[in-house]
Every structure is written in structure tokens, then in C-alpha cells.
Image (cartoon, rainbow, N blue to C red):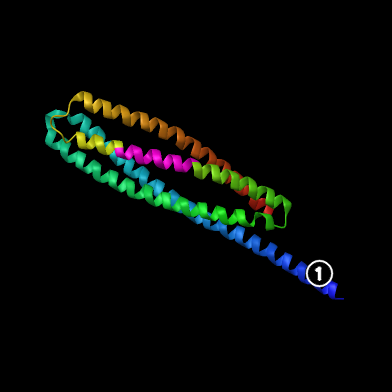
């Protein structure tokens, strides 16, 4: 009789743990979804600022040395835009870090999930998410370096005695950094597509 009671209690605890794990994992994925929405907002703002930056750059290049005062003015405006971009990339970075913390919560609960198919799918999704966040870390560092190089360029443009060779050298450095950034960004987008596909599969399995 006592043994039966003990088994009943154990089964109840196991079921409770499984339910709690399900709730924790679902809650973590929901939080990640909210963080991802915030990331999209930051990316849209960054894109708008980058377009303004490119427009200012084109205007600066069209003026050249002949209208140095105008070049200085536009260079200062460009530096202000870079500061704004830096603020948004920092917000994006912090949001991604918060999402990564939720992945850790999910990993702690995977073994407690009652359904084997769900466990397998969650594991697959977590692996992709971790690669995606690792790629983002690389993307973030390259973007910060790009901003630093751009700052140097717009500072040089305010120097009346800067040589064409100095400017071209800095522009070349920016272009090389941008190429690397585009490559990493493409990789990040690939992981994002994979993550979204696996997330849909998980929700279908969970139903």
C-alpha cells in the first residue's frame, strides 16, 4: 500500500516537472519572439540611417575640395549619424544577448520535455539559434569596426590639408570592411531563415 502511494507521488512529480518544463520552454520561445521583433525595429532604423549616410557621402564627393566649408558641414552631420547608428547597434546587441539567455533557459529544460519528437526538434532549433547568435557576435564586431573607420574618414574630410591618397586609402579600408560585413550578414540571414523554418516545425509538432 505504501509503495503504491509512493509511486503515485513520483508519477505526479514527474508529470508536474514535465508540464513545468513545457511551460518554461514555451515561455522562453515567446520571449525570444518579442526580442526578435525589437531586433527588426533596430535593423529598420539602422537601414534608414545608413541610407541618409550614403546620401550625405554622395553629396560630399560631388562637392570636392572646391566647397570645403560645405564638406565640413556635411562631414559633421555624417558623424552625428554614425553616433545614432552606434546607439541602435548597441540596443540591437543587448536585445540579442537577452534572447541568448532564453536559449540557456530552454537548454536547461530540454531533458524534462515529455515528448521525444518535441525534444528532438527543440534541440535542433537550439543548435541553429546558437550558431545564429555566434554569427551575430561576429557581425556586431565588424559593424563596430566599420563605424570606427567611417568616423576616421569624416574626420579626415574636415582636414583642409588631407591628401587624395589619404582619403582613398581610408575609403579602401572601409570598402574591404564592408565586403566582410556583407558576407557575415548573408550567413546570419541564412541562419535566420533556418531558425524560422525549424520554429514552424516545432510549433506544428507541439500541436
Residue at image location 34% in from the left, 37% down from the top: 146
Query: x%, y% of residue 92?
Result: 41, 50
Up the image or down, 159 lies above or below 199; here it is above
Q: Secondary structure at mark 1?
A: helix
Q: Is residue 147 magenta?
A: yes
Looking at the picture, tell me which residue is in the foreground, 87 or 46: 87
Query: x%, y% of residue 132?
Result: 52, 43
Left or right, 126 with respect to 60, comes to right
Query: x%, y% of residue 141?
Result: 40, 41
Does the image show residue 41?
Answer: no
Residue span colored magenta: 135-148
| Magenta segment, prevailing SS (helix, strand or loop) | helix
Q: Is residue 206 magenta?
A: no
Residue at image location 33% in from the left, 46% down from the top: 86
- The quadrant of the rendering that contains the C terminus is bottom right
Query: x%, y% of residue 160?
Result: 13, 32
Pick out the residue farthest to the right. 1
Q: Quadrant of residue 4?
A: bottom right
Q: Quadrant of residue 177?
A: top left
Up the image or down, 83 lies above or below 13; here it is above
Pick out the residue farthest to the bottom. 1
Residue at image location 45% in from the left, 37% down from the top: 185
- The quadrant of the rendering that contains the N terminus is bottom right
Does the image show residue 158?
Answer: yes
Q: Which residue is mark 1?
A: 7
Pick out the residue farthest to the top. 165
Callout 1: 10 Å neighbours few (<14), some, many (20+)? Answer: few
Looking at the picture, tell me which residue is in the foreground, 156 or 55: 156
Amino acid at each position: 500500500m505504501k509503495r503504491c502511494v509512493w509511486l503515485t507521488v513520483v508519477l505526479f512529480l514527474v508529470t508536474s516537472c514535465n508540464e513545468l518544463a513545457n511551460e518554461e520552454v514555451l515561455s522562453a520561445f515567446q520571449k525570444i519572439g518579442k526580442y526578435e521583433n525589437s531586433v527588426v525595429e533596430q535593423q529598420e532604423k539602422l537601414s534608414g540611417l545608413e541610407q541618409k549616410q550614403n546620401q550625405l557621402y554622395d553629396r560630399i564627393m560631388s562637392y570636392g575640395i572646391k566647397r570645403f566649408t560645405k564638406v565640413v558641414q556635411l562631414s559633421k552631420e555624417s558623424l552625428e549619424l554614425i553616433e545614432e547608428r552606434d546607439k541602435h547597434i548597441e540596443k540591437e546587441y543587448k536585445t540579442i544577448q537577452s534572447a541568448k539567455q532564453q536559449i540557456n533557459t530552454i537548454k536547461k529544460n530540454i531533458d524534462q520535455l515529455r515528448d521525444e519528437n518535441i525534444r528532438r526538434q527543440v534541440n535542433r532549433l537550439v543548435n541553429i539559434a546558437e550558431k545564429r547568435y555566434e554569427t551575430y557576435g561576429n557581425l556586431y564586431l565588424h559593424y563596430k569596426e566599420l563605424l570606427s573607420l567611417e568616423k576616421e574618414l569624416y574626420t579626415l574630410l574636415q582636414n583642409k590639408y588631407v591628401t587624395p591618397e589619404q582619403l582613398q586609402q581610408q575609403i579602401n579600408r572601409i570598402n574591404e570592411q564592408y565586403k566582410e560585413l556583407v558576407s557575415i550578414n548573408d550567413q546570419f540571414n541564412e541562419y535566420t531563415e533556418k531558425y524560422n523554418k525549424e520554429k514552424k516545425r516545432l510549433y506544428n509538432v507541439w500541436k
